[in-house]
Amino acid sequence: MAKKGQYTYEYPHPAVTADCVVFGYDGKELKVLLIKRGAEKEASTTAYAGEWALPGGFMDIDKDKTIAHTAQRELKEETGLKLGIKDFKEVATFSDIKRDPRERVITIAHYALVKLSDVQADTDAEKAEWFSIEDVPSLAFDHDKILRVACSRLRQNIHFEPVGFELMPEVFTLPQLQNLYEAILEVKFDRRNFANKMKHFGMLVEVEDGTPRHGTRTPIKYRFDKDNYDRLKAQGFQLEF
Amino acid sequence: MAKKGQYTYEYPHPAVTADCVVFGYDGKELKVLLIKRGAEKEASTTAYAGEWALPGGFMDIDKDKTIAHTAQRELKEETGLKLGIKDFKEVATFSDIKRDPRERVITIAHYALVKLSDVQADTDAEKAEWFSIEDVPSLAFDHDKILRVACSRLRQNIHFEPVGFELMPEVFTLPQLQNLYEAILEVKFDRRNFANKMKHFGMLVEVEDGTPRHGTRTPIKYRFDKDNYDRLKAQGFQLEF
DNA sequence: AATATTTTGTGTAAAATTTACTCAAATTAT
DNA sequence: ATAATTTGAGTAAATTTTACACAAAATATT
């Protein structure tokens, strides 16, 4: 461990952290991953001990190639979740002078979208917990604000890139997908119109499972056509609601 | 001036800067404000001496309330332009490990929109110069990349907030406004369709100047209805093209 | 000075998109 | 058992978007 007071600069430097807003979806609710700040060994985690917070931590200026790598590394360390570097989307910088009681700390917030079904087993339940977005406790530092801004950023981005693939399980139903969009955008859609709009993009492939059809309460199952999905993602699309 | 080696930390800290992409519009072309990096007194400006760059500089962790205040202060110091703090919109963080040859520096890029007619006189011509966005020289550091990302961010934001007010002069013509949108979005519109769409928002007020009308080459003059403009800006609008 | 070119305002018809809506069968809840 | 909820499917009306032509004035060309 580094000796205290080892790093000197001609001018004062702020500390820089990356925080992660990890969204997951279980087919019913949009969720977010939080950690409980512990009274741990690390001096740097003692502030707001015992409170819920977004995963994140200090940039390692020697190891972290970019600030997104900080987010990736800290998320792994704090929750056990290992995501790809491209999964981290920048949200905004939070730099209020008093946002951290210890020293001047600016944080670059990121968000990531994950299939809850895939990762729930990976998350270290000792430290991390999934909360419904509707039911998040009050958070350490300015993390309430960060979460709000991340949500609104996600709401914006949903108009420019398809968002289901990252959040939905491999096989899903249209009502589930609609529910996700409604949860993110906080609106309600007409079932048939939503289905038509989605089908128009050509991203959906019906999954045959031999169950009887027509006028049934059991919804049809779909998966994403990955090629079309990636193409749409690359060229950017316009989704109007 | 601070003594060398005065500031010490337990862990290494990156230096943090804010850079500014200031867009202006003269009724014909979208422009951006650049500075010429000088071989000046300040040690911190010696890198890339003599090259063109975005205005910006190091965060003052004691004085700058937020990173946007860094952008505001540095823009004033380097170009003479004093903008309101809300004029600065965050673009993204640039944090590649080698982006600055001197030390680890991460920068938070911002953009701002200004009426060229209002501010051209304020800009210190010794240090700063307006370049057509079509004709920008190659820039210091990774500023080429920052500029590209700022342009695409502006292109995105234009769909969610009215953007003319900040860039157009008080009185303007529809062809000028269309030209601005075409410059930002890099597309061409039909004149009549563009006019109809714009008029639908109710932001435009015709300015009577007693000149003859009908089938003339002298375009009608408009100004923005500030109340409606602000209302639309606040509630966010959807502009489809 | 005459002539050609460019720019402007205006309206409408066709095409595309969006919206609103009903019913019967199957599942789940009571 | 009975009631309530959920699902898929198709169409007509309303709205929005797109495409398009001409005459007058200003500017550019010779």
Image (cartoon, coloured by chain):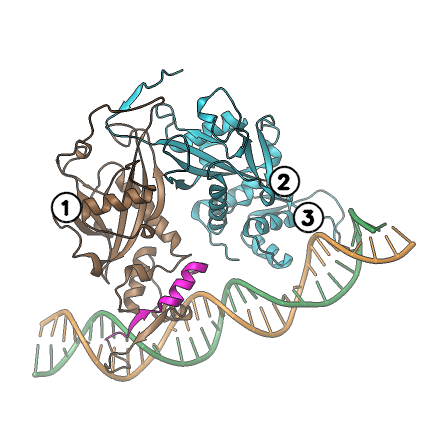
Chain colours: A cyan, B brown, C green, D orange
Q: Where is residue B76 in the image (x, y as percent from the top left)?
A: 22, 47
Up/down of A8 relative to A14, above or below: above
Q: Give how far apart the Cα atoms at labels 3 and 1 are.
A: 65 Å
- The x and y percentages for residue A80 are 54, 26
Name the chain letter of the residue that bears numbered label 2.
A
Whether residue A237 sits left or right of residue A217 in the image: it is left
- Of all chains, the one bearing label 3 is A
Q: Is residue B240 magenta?
A: yes
Mark 2 and mark 1 residues within 8 Å of each other at the beta carbon: no
SS for callout 1: loop
Element marked by disc 3 = loop
> Which-is-in-front pick, marks 2 and 1?
1
The image quadrant of residue B218 is bottom left
Say which of marks 3 and 1 sits in front. 1
Q: Crowding near pointer 1: few (<14 within 10 Å), some, many (20+)? A: some
The N terminus of chain B lies in quadrant: top left
Within-10-Å neighbours for mark 3: few <14, some 14–19, many 20+:
some
Amino acid tagged 1 = Lys
Chain letter of mark 1 equals B
Q: In this view, does A220 lie to the left or right of B101?
A: right
Dot 2 lies on which element? loop
Q: Distance between the residues labelled 3 and 2?
A: 18 Å
Residue position marked by numbered label 3 in the rendering:
A220
Q: What residue type is labelled 3?
A: Ile
A102 relative to B129 in the view: left or right: right
Q: What stretch is highlighted in magenta?
A: B218-241
Report crowding for label 2: few under 14, some 14 to 19, many 20 or more residues within 10 A (C-alpha): some
Residue hosting label 2: A26
- Under mark 2, the amino acid is Asp
Q: In which quarter of the image is residue A120?
A: top right
Q: How far is disc 2 from disc 1 in space, using C-alphas?
A: 56 Å
Q: Is residue A109 magenta?
A: no
